Amino acid sequence: MFRGIIEDIDTAILRDPAARNRIEVALTYPGVHAVWGYRVSNFLWRHRLKLLARIYSNWIRTLTGIEIHPAATIGSRFFIDHGMGVVIGETSEIGDDVLIYQGVTLGGTGKDTGKRHPTIGDGVVIGTGAKILGNIRIGDFVTPEPCLRELRNGRLAGVAMDDRTGVWVVFKALQKIATAKPRAKVVAVSAAQEEI
């Protein structure tokens, strides 16, 4: 447990150039506090103390402005920078080394049951205000743009860039349009896939 706390603090120092030392991060970073609160509420949730888990996560949301459902699955070295307005839904799955900025929503698209929130791969950076909605998967090392949404037909709408290859992928209804390099003209059109 102590090792996880130090890892969270060191991740914040690594990812945020404004972070000066461990004491400052531990005392003043709401994203770190929200992750610690999530870990406690997730423990309670997994041990069938679901009401207590929800009450505790609600209290953490009030303190930090960050809402993480206790049933969400979050990997190691997860960091929320600034954080106000971040919402992470119940069936969200987040990989290792993920960075999320303020105002991000990993949400559902309605009253679906079962898996209804996004799955975020390892090494993903999700920028300010991004809304990623529905049961979709964002692949490893991708930087999604502000809005990805699962449409009624199961296809995606939005754009994303694979940070390893620099390839932008634009999703519109039934088509996926890929480009040769970031912000370049469209060079190929193919059928949409579920994973970006």
Image (cartoon, helix red, strand yellow):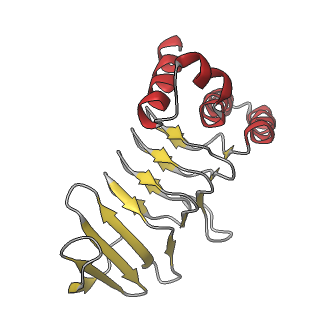
Residue that appears at 30% across and 75% down: 183
Q: Is residue 108 visible?
A: yes
Query: Where is residue 14 drawn, in percent x and y?
Result: 41, 31
Q: Looking at the image, is 86 positioned above or below residue 63?
A: below
Question: Which picture quadrant has residue 196?
Answer: bottom left
Query: Where is residue 38 drawn, in percent x and y?
Result: 64, 34
Q: Looking at the image, is 44 positioned above or below residue 123?
A: above
Count of picture labels = 0
Residue that appears at 79% across and 40% down: 58
Question: On the picture, is 122 further left or further right than 57?
Answer: left
Residue that appears at 37% across and 68% down: 160
Residue furthest out toward the top:
2
Residue that appears at 58% across and 59% down: 114
Question: On the picture, is 113 further left or further right than 191?
Answer: right
Query: Where is residue 52 drawn, in percent x and y?
Result: 79, 32
Question: Which picture quadrant has residue 191?
Answer: bottom left
Question: Which picture quadrant has residue 48?
Answer: top right
Q: Is residue 195 visible?
A: no
Question: On the picture, is 147 further left or further right than 48?
Answer: left
Frontmost residue, 161 versus 14: 14
